[in-house]
Image (cartoon, rainbow, N blue to C red):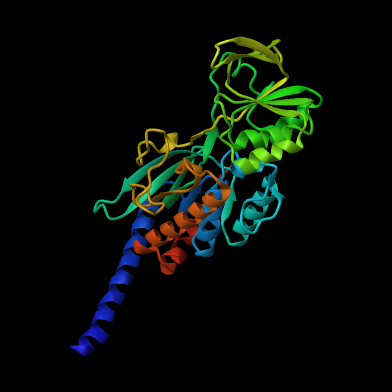
Amino acid sequence: MNFYIKKIVPLIFCNFILYANDFTSKYLEKKLQATDETKSLVPLAIIGGGSAGLAAGIYGGRANMHTVVFMGTHPGGQLVETSIVENIPGVSRKTGEEIMDLTKQQAKEFGALLLDETIKKIEIETSDDDDKQIFVLTNDADEKIYALAIVIATGSSPRKLNVPGEDEYFGNGVSTCALCDCVLYKGQDVVIVGGGDDAVEKAMQVAPYAKNVTILVRSDRMRAAPKMCDKLSDYENVKIVYNKKVTEIVGDGDCVTGIRIIDILTLEEDFMPVAGVFLAVGHNPNTGLYKDLIDISDDGYIILQSRSQQTCTPGIYAAGDVADGQYRQAGTANGDGIKAALDAVKYLRSKGFTEKVAREMRPRYYKGMVR
């Protein structure tokens, strides 16, 4: 009996693993040969190049998986729009752009491939026995890319006020990026619409340039953390006005000249002459691409399974603001990205994607868009 346990069982198990590897390899080879693509395989595809996506890229690379980070049109994510960051453990007062540059470099050093490509469509194809599945990604050049596991890290997008004049003057007086546009308002009056940490951050970014900065808050108090609000005392040209709502953004046809506001309590209307309007009214998760693949909450966030980054679809994981409507911090996004990559690597190995299969599939790996 002991001989059977010590000798025969390991042999059977070993043969099963080899069979699983061969089956996986043959399945992939057959699948890819059925297409016109010769170099189109990505074992671990990460969609999004912000804090969560790049953290996942680091761990995917460290696991010796061919990992591709599709960074899209906004490499670095929202953190690149932040000035000084001082609340990430181990990072002392660096700009958001500096932090993301360092993170990109670290991901590259571990072998992750960072591409400025956008994924615009995702489909699932399954083998006849429903045991093997592959994700078909379509990029912005209409190329087909075949992924075995996916980490979604597409973050969120700034919300708008949805008032007259907002779209007309967006980019010409209306902005969501104070760090990008603050220099345009030297010696002029501007408003920040919002009451959270983002509003305080934007006010501090604009204050060194603008003549006066007014933070307009719809309620009777700020939602920003007390420590953030305390920082505003260093800026004499920043003031907070409560219970005000913007009803229209006014301009001269070329740029913003002012805003119309209403007092929430008295319903009194007023006009405020300003040259710039910075929006800080929250964000919407970028989940539209995945609505037919995974479960999404009523407020647009990806629903995760228990205490993991796993979605309801095996092989698809999510990390960062796209699945987190509560914390929304760079540090938590980093942690989510790390967990998502670890989950994805474990999934790939459980499906038989071992080093042997990786070596066989290496000539098929996707290395970037054909332009």
Q: Nearer the viewer, residue 179 or 327?
A: 327
Horizontally, is 131 left or right of 237 in the view? left
Residue at 79%, 25% in the rendered image: 211
Quadrant showing the N terminus: bottom left
Residue lying furthest right = 187
Quadrant showing the C terminus: top right
Vertical placement of residue 158 versus 250, above or below: below
Q: Is residue 63 visible?
A: yes
Vertical placement of residue 359 versus 232, above or below: below
Q: Nearer the viewer, residue 109 or 198?
A: 198
Horizontally, is 115 left or right of 296 in the view? right
Residue at 55%, 12% in the rendered image: 266
Where residue 338 appears, as percent x and y from the top left, is: 50, 57
Residue at 41%, 65% in the rendered image: 357
Q: Nearer the viewer, residue 170 or 109?
A: 170
Q: Nearer the viewer, residue 45 or 187?
A: 187
Where residue 123 appears, as percent x and y from the top left, is: 38, 41
Horizontally, is 132 left or right of 244 in the view? left
Where residue 19 appears, as percent x and y from the top left, is: 30, 69
Q: How many numbered marks does the figure carry?
A: 0
Q: Is residue 81 visible?
A: no
Where residue 314 appears, as percent x and y from the top left, is: 34, 51
Residue lying furthest left = 1
